[in-house]
């Protein structure tokens, strides 16, 4: 068994109902943030974190994702004929950027079930999970920060964000205490899914990045459907917590929920303002609209 985190699972079998009607035909993961589908941001983060093998868990109607990470002969031939070298490079780069495998989740039975679908492709080694609609802007890729913690602590790591106030009720929330060696690390003793503010065991909200040991697969196999009749990943991790150490990690960076309309708008503004080719023009435009 390799103890290196080499594989990243991208659950992308969900229905994306929060983004209807855009997601009636187009997979949520293919919605563009500025000029790249949101799944590509996650794949780039994984590769920049040392991941060698991308595993996409897809579902019915999601084949656009497979086409995106493949060669597009007609497009490429046309770009070549027209002498559009830079665009050709952009198109080909996506096709060659990663080793990608696909597995289908036949029904959207929950995030835990989607992760379990990747069991055979992951095998008996630690692995990462990236929820593609959580787009993270960070100087050091969020997943890289987490893999460093995993290597140091030899236990599963869940990315967290500090939320003070009622917003915490939208998340899974950790129980436990901050590590003495590093206040960003949280020694996890439990977690509560979407608690009321007064019941929240801490202000550490779980977001869409995980580094997990393969034991979680066996535990997910016996996890019963929980909230909403879905097999929840958090229930699998709660079972893991009874056997192994699990850590929270308050990553350095900013997370956007691009699976949500407002979150996508925030991400669009902030990512556009970072693009040198139109940052100034866009800033001036925003000033004009807002005043
Ligand atoms: P979400 O709850 O954010 O995604 O799940 P969703 O269900 O697609 O979206 P809404 O809430 O209806 O708008 C987080 C991630 O888990 C995946 C989703 O594709 C998303 O990337 N997921 C969820 C699965 O792969 N399978 C599932 O059964 C459920």
Image (spheres, helix red, strand yellow):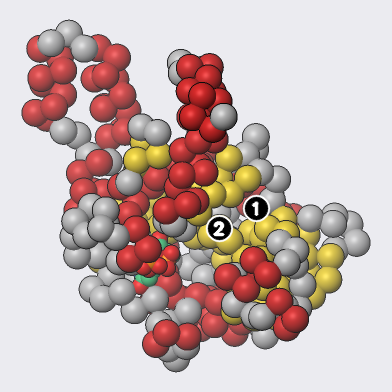
Q: Which residue is mark 2?
A: 209
**Whether residue 154 is situated above or below residue 234 in the rendered picture:** above
**Ligand 1 within 8 A of label 2's CB?**
no
Left or right of residue 256: residue 66: left
Instruction: Give the residue drawn at x 31%, y 24%.
Output: 90
**Whether residue 199 is situated above or below residue 111 in the rendered picture:** below
Expressed as whole percent of the image width and height from the top left, the position of residue 85 reads: 25, 12
Expressed as whole percent of the image width and height from the top left, the position of residue 36 reads: 36, 36
Instruction: Give the residue drawn at x 21%, y 12%.
Output: 84
For marks 1 and 2, the one nearer the N-term is 1
**Whether residue 77 is situated above or below residue 159 in the rendered picture:** above
Instruction: Please report contact status of discs 1 and 2: CB closer than 8 Å, yes or no.
Output: yes
Q: Which residue is mark 1?
A: 146
CA–CA distance in space, label 1 to label 2: 8 Å
Query: Which image quadrant is residue 157 in?
Result: bottom right
Give the number of the mark in front: 1 or 2: 2
The quarter of the picture where the C terminus appears is top right
Viewer-nearest residue: 59 or 30: 30
């Amino acid at each position: 068994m390799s103890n290196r985190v080499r594989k990243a699972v991208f659950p992308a079998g969900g229905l994306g109902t929060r983004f209807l009607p855009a997601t009636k035909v187009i997979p949520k993961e293919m919605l563009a943030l500025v000029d790249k589908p949101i799944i590509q941001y996650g794949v780039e983060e994984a590769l920049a974190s040392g991941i060698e093998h991308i595993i996409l868990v897809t579902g019915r109607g999601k084949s656009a994702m497979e086409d995106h990470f493949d060669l597009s002969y007609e497009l490429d031939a046309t770009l070549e004929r027209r002498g559009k070298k830079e665009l050709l490079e952009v198109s080909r780069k996506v096709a060659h950027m990663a080793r990608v495998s696909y597995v289908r989740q036949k029904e959207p039975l929950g995030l835990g079930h989607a992760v379990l679908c990747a069991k055979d492709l992951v095998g008996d080694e630690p692995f990462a999970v990236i929820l593609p609609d959580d787009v993270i802007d960070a100087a050091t890729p969020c997943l890289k920060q987490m893999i460093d913690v995993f290597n140091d602590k030899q236990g599963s790591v869940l990315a967290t964000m500090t939320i003070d106030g009622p917003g915490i009720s939208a998340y899974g929330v950790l129980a436990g205490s901050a590590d003495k060696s590093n206040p960003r690390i949280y020694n996890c003793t439990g977690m509560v899914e979407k608690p009321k503010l007064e019941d929240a065991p801490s202000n550490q909200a779980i977001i869409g990045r995980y580094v997990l040991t393969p034991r979680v697969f066996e535990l997910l196999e016996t996890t019963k459907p929980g909230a909403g009749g879905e097999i929840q990943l958090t229930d699998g991790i709660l079972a893991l917590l009874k056997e192994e150490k699990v850590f929270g990690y308050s990553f350095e960076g900013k997370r956007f929920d691009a699976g949500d309309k407002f979150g996508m708008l925030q991400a669009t503004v902030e990512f556009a303002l970072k693009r040198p080719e139109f940052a100034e023009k866009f800033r001036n435009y925003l000033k004009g609209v807002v005043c």
